[in-house]
Image (cartoon, rainbow, N blue to C red):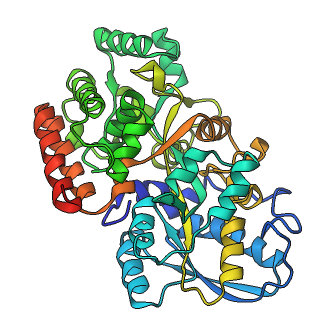
Amino acid sequence: MFLGLPSRRSALAIPSILVLVLMACTGENGPTEGAATGDGDGDLSGTITVVHAWAGTEGEAFQAVVDAFEEDNAGVTVELRQVPFDELNSQMIQQFSAGTPPDVVSTLPGLIHSLAAQGLLMPLDDLWDGWVDAGEYSESFRTIASHEGTAYGVFFKGNINGLIWHRTDVLSDLGIEPPTDWDAFVAAIEEIQAAGEFEPFAVGASDVWVPTQWSDAFLAKVAGPDAFNGLIDGSVSWDDPAVVDAFTQFSDFVQAYWPDDALEVGFTDANCAWASQGEAVFQNQGAFVNLTTPANCDESLDPEEDFTFFEMPAPNPDNAEVHFVSGDLFSVAEATDNPDAAKAFARYLGSAQAQAIWAERGGFIAPNATTDPSVYPTENDRLAAELFTSGTAVYDLDDAIGGEIQAVEREQLVSLIQSGDVDAFIQAMLEVTDRVRGG
């Protein structure tokens, strides 16, 4: 979501509107003594600078998380610096290159790869060793946070994608049960098409990130995690048969079941088309829709009663437990002047105690699997969190790759949606990958 990626991030922010739906207070799930740093080190002191992108209500939630760390580590001052999301990537590359980085910075895998390749990030394998051994994170999350086998990031805020959202009353009126496998999913779509009352899907593909939400879900659940991660690290080619099969199935699905105006509609309009306007039955989106739907579409909608989701079934049943995720990580600068406090803060952000503070407020999935599920304000949040921490996770492909390859993939997905020409899409991705990474 770096390099000029406005829409997915702004869908999560909408600070002025979300004030109404985020009014929940923190309870008894904050950091306990010693848990904030993971080692109870009372000798930490000094100041650390932490760069993040959250504003409005999200910024307030993150401040509450930071406040709890400072309470548990009275000798440390955390100076927060908010950088607009679309500027964060370029600013951090400049600052790290100039030798003046912040101590801790919000990162996504694409930026982690870029900075770690230059030796600019602190290795964090010792944190991950403890977390994986304790069942707090799986190895698949460690892989996401790593560059060439070494972990350089910690997870803090999660999102699971490939969720098929729907109003409970609409599905009930149609006499359709939430499908649990691919054949039942296709049968339900075709039943909706045959009835002619609704479009099967609302798709806001004029926002450039929306097509990737669909293609990544197919790639994860057709080709599987090895092929998915191989495209990120370059060990798998775009013309690998499993990759070609995934994009072929995605293209066939688009041609058969997407609305004709998908490329002319934005995310917010698509979101409201199924939620409040009765124009479509389903929308494929991330867990954040639980929060944005009442805020953007109809404040009377109750996520406990009026709408819910099921995960998109896997066309390849061997990949039914592969989940397509995204989220926010943090990394520590190798050149930090306060390595003990900076690393302790990173350890804290990866803890269940820190993540529960924001999870209570809504619109947040705690990546740490030991987070108490009772902290979530709605059942939809709890279900999404359960999916996030189960099975095998793969991280949002274009965000993990970043740069020119990301930009070209987005452009070519639009062409694929328009033409259905999978061969042209694969050839374009081979060419840009060869140009950027070498043959």
Residue at x 75%, y 85% (from the top left corner): 76
Residue at x 60%, y 38% (from the top left corner): 384
Q: In the orientation shown, which residue stands out farthest toward the right?
A: 33
**Where on the picture, by quarter, is residue 278?**
top left
Question: Would you say 262 lies left or right of 11 here?
Answer: left
Count the marks: how many? 0
Question: Would you say 163 lies left or right of 240 here?
Answer: right
Q: Position of residue 167 (x, y in %)?
A: 50, 27
**Where on the picture, by quarter, is residue 274?**
top left
Q: Position of residue 433 (x, y in %)?
A: 21, 54
Q: Where is residue 256 in the image (x, y as percent from the top left)?
A: 22, 20
Question: Would you say 254 lies left or right of 278 here?
Answer: left
Question: Is the N terminus in the top left, top right, bottom left or bottom right quadrant?
Answer: bottom left
Question: Would you say 174 lies left or right of 303 here?
Answer: left
The correct choice, above or below, for 179 with respect to 101 in the image is above
**Where on the picture, by quarter, is residue 386?**
top right
Residue at x 87%, y 64% (from the top left corner): 32
Residue at x 71%, y 69% (from the top left corner): 64
Tell me if residue 319 can be seen: yes
